[in-house]
Structure formats: structure tokens, C-alpha cells
């Protein structure tokens, strides 16, 4: 073959190889090189976990009309060596009907109409020597790579990455923490008092609010401890710094039991369900209320008070006045995480894995 033809064919071959080389996109892009501020479990590394991550299209624009071929999770920066293992994963992708700030705690409600199972099988978590950062390379010893068996064409919309993981017996990676971004937003709260009864210690503080769940777009968690299987009534409304003794209202309780509610907006019932874990029985049964908050301006800087009443004894909890943050989460991602066998999970609209997508 004449030399000139060899040169032309070599150039064509090189161009073809370059065209076929995959591209990569890190979400959030700000952590393409450097470690983010938090870390998060990997589903199946040590226990049965389902993790759904919802990602806004604005994070994924370079992949529009492209075929996704793999997802990688990078280790969190720390001097600690992560011991490796194997997880059994099933990964499905779809275009969710929900944006992150309106995602559901029900896994099925976040899955799009045409989900594609892109991978199922064992995935290796490598033994990873300590990396202190801030830069952490996407190298083989630093990543968990999920290479798709079925590619996924991304056509736009909120991407739902649905991962169900199960540990492999004898191959648990008990502390392999993946990099995650965390947006530091939380409600503020103050205790108005009024608690009485057998729970909550000397101050009778048996009502609580999970401050990082109480924000626009979040699923706010309120919980309390009481006598197992008693029925609890959670009052939401405008609080009062001055309490009204419940005995003055005719209830058969000591004067220390005070109602710190000026008015009621919402009433919710929940049983104090016994704790199953050993050693936790002394704190009583746990009752929980979850309230999905919209991401509209009405929930910015919103103030409310929560107080519980044990309807079997008429004893009151401490009243907690809380105020939501004055800004909406801007992460553009949401994480729904729970037991692999459950229909629902806990929602975080301010925490999500850093992911690297491979596409072509």
C-alpha cells in the first residue's frame, strides 16, 4: 500500500477512536476534582438499602440526547483506608415525574413511566488507601464503578437513579463512604416548656423536631416518646410563652402539665410504638409525624409550635417553637433512602451523592 494511503487510513482510524471515547460528567460539577463537604453510605455495602437520587436537568445538560453507559461514586476524602468488599446491586434509570424539591417519600412515586434496568449483579468496592484531599482522583482505587449492561438514552427531565443494594455474605464493606454534597440548611427552634409525665428526663422534654428536615421542599419529621401504645395527639399552631395549666382546664393532671398553644392549625394522631432495639425501652414508645413542605415562598421563614398530648393520661410534652430557613435548597438533587424492602424512605433535599456519569 502506498505510504500516503497508510497515513490517510491511520488518521481516519485515530479520528474514529477519538469519536468513540466516552465523555464524563460530574454532578454537582463543582466537585469534578475536589472533595465535597459530606459523605454517604453506598447501598448494599453493609446492609439492605434502597437509594433514589433525583437530579435536575440543569445538572445534566451536556448529556442531552446522549447514551449513558456507567455511574461512578468516588470515596470521601480522609486519611483512613476503606476496606473493600462486594455489594449486590440493581440499578434502574427513569425520567421522574417529580423535581427534587417535590419528590415523594414513596419510592414508586418517583419512578418514571418507562424505567430501564441498566444493571444487576455484584459490584466491587475496592480497598482504598487514605486520600486527604482536597483533590480526589477518579482512579480505580478511589471509585465504585457501575458499568451498565443496558445503556440509557437521556432525553431530558429529572433523572431518577434508583439503586437497590444487598450485602454479600462475608464481603461487607462496613465503612466505605462515598463523597456527598451537603447544603447547610436547618430550622431553628426553642423550647417553651410545659412538659410533664414519666418521659423526657427531669425537664420532661419528650417532644422533638428534626431541624434539618424542616425546610422548603423537605419532609419535616416531628417525634415524641410516651407510654408504649398510648395514643398521642400532636398539636401544630401558634405557640404561647405562657402556659395554661391543664388541671385548670379540668384535666386530671398535675399543675406542671401546661398547654403552650395559643391556637391550633393542624392536629395529628400517632401511637407511641415500642422500640424494638435492645436498651431503648426506657425512653418509651416513639410516635412520629411527617409533614411534606412545599417549596413555595409561604414556607420561607415560617414559624410554628408543636406540642404533644398523651390522650391516655392527658400529660403534655414540652412545646417546641420552630422556624424554617429563609431560603430554598439550591442543590438541585434529592436523596430518598430506606430499607430495600420498604415502600418509602427518608427524604433529603439538601444531601446527595457526588456522581460521575459516563456517556457517549
Image: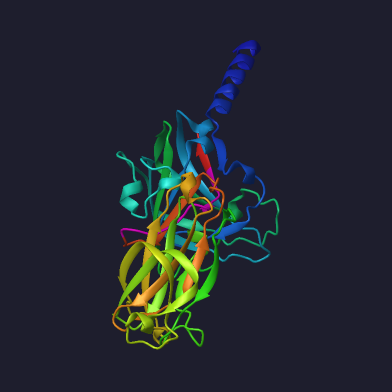
Quadrant (top left/top right/bottom left/bottom right) for the N terminus: top right
The color scheme shown is rainbow
Marker count (numbered): 0
Task: Decide which of 246, 142 is in the foreground and name it.
Answer: 246
Can residue 318 be seen?
Answer: no
Does residue 351 belong to the magenta stretch?
A: yes
Q: Residue at x 48, y 51 (%)?
A: 299
Residue 324 in the image: above or below residue 151? below
Task: Decide which of 21, 161 is in the foreground and name it.
Answer: 161
Could you tell me residue 104's position as x and y percent? 37, 51
Task: Decide which of 324, 171 is in the foreground and name it.
Answer: 324
In this rendering, position of residue 358 left or right of residue 279: right
Does residue 253 belong to the magenta stretch?
A: no
Residue 239 in the image: above or below residue 36? below
Can residue 330 be seen?
Answer: yes
Q: Which residues are magenta?
A: 343-356
Could you tell me residue 52's position as x and y percent? 41, 52
Amino acid at each position: 500500500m502506498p505510504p500516503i494511503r497508510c497515513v490517510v487510513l491511520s488518521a481516519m482510524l485515530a479520528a474514529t477512536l477519538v469519536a468513540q471515547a466516552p465523555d464524563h460528567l460530574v454532578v454537582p460539577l463543582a466537585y469534578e476534582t475536589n472533595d465535597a463537604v459530606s459523605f454517604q453510605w453506598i447501598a448494599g455495602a453493609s446492609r439492605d438499602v434502597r437509594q433514589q437520587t433525583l437530579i435536575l436537568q440543569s445538572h445534566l445538560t451536556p448529556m442531552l440526547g446522549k447514551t449513558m453507559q456507567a455511574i461512578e461514586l468516588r470515596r470521601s476524602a480522609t486519611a483512613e483506608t476503606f476496606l473493600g468488599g462486594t455489594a449486590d446491586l440493581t440499578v434502574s434509570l427513569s425520567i421522574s415525574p417529580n423535581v427534587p424539591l417535590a419528590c415523594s417519600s414513596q419510592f414508586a412515586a418517583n419512578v418514571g413511566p418507562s424505567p430501564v434496568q441498566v444493571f444487576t449483579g455484584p459490584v466491587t468496592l475496592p480497598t482504598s488507601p487514605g486520600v486527604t484531599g482536597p483533590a480526589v482522583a477518579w482512579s480505580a482505587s478511589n471509585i465504585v464503578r457501575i458499568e451498565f449492561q443496558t445503556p440509557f438514552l437521556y432525553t431530558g427531565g429529572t433523572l431518577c437513579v434508583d439503586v437497590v443494594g444487598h450485602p454479600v455474605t462475608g464481603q461487607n464493606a462496613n465503612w466505605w463512604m462515598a463523597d456527598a454534597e451537603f447544603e447547610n440548611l436547618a430550622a431553628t427552634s426553642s423550647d417553651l416548656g410545659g412538659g410533664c409525665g414519666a418521659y423526657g428526663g427531669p425537664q420532661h422534654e419528650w417532644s422533638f423536631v428534626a431541624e434539618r428536615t424542616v425546610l422548603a421542599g423537605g419532609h419535616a419529621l416531628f417525634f415524641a416518646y410516651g407510654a408504649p401504645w398510648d395514643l398521642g395527639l400532636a398539636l401544630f399552631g401558634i405557640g404561647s410563652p405562657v402556659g395554661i395549666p391543664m388541671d385548670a382546664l379540668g384535666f386530671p393532671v398535675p399543675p406542671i402539665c401546661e398547654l403552650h398553644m395559643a391556637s391550633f392549625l393542624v392536629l395529628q394522631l400517632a401511637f407511641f410504638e415500642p422500640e424494638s432495639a435492645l436498651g431503648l425501652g426506657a425512653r418509651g414508645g416513639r410516635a412520629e409525624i411527617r409533614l411534606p413542605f412545599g417549596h413555595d415562598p409561604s414556607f420561607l421563614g415560617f414559624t410554628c409550635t408543636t406540642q404533644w398530648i398523651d390522650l391516655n393520661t392527658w400529660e403534655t410534652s414540652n412545646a417546641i417553637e420552630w422556624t424554617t430557613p429563609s431560603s430554598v435548597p439550591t442543590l438541585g438533587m434529592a436523596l430518598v433512602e430506606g430499607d430495600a424492602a420498604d415502600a418509602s424512605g427518608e427524604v433529603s433535599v439538601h444531601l446527595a451523592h457526588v456522581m460521575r456519569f459516563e456517556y457517549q
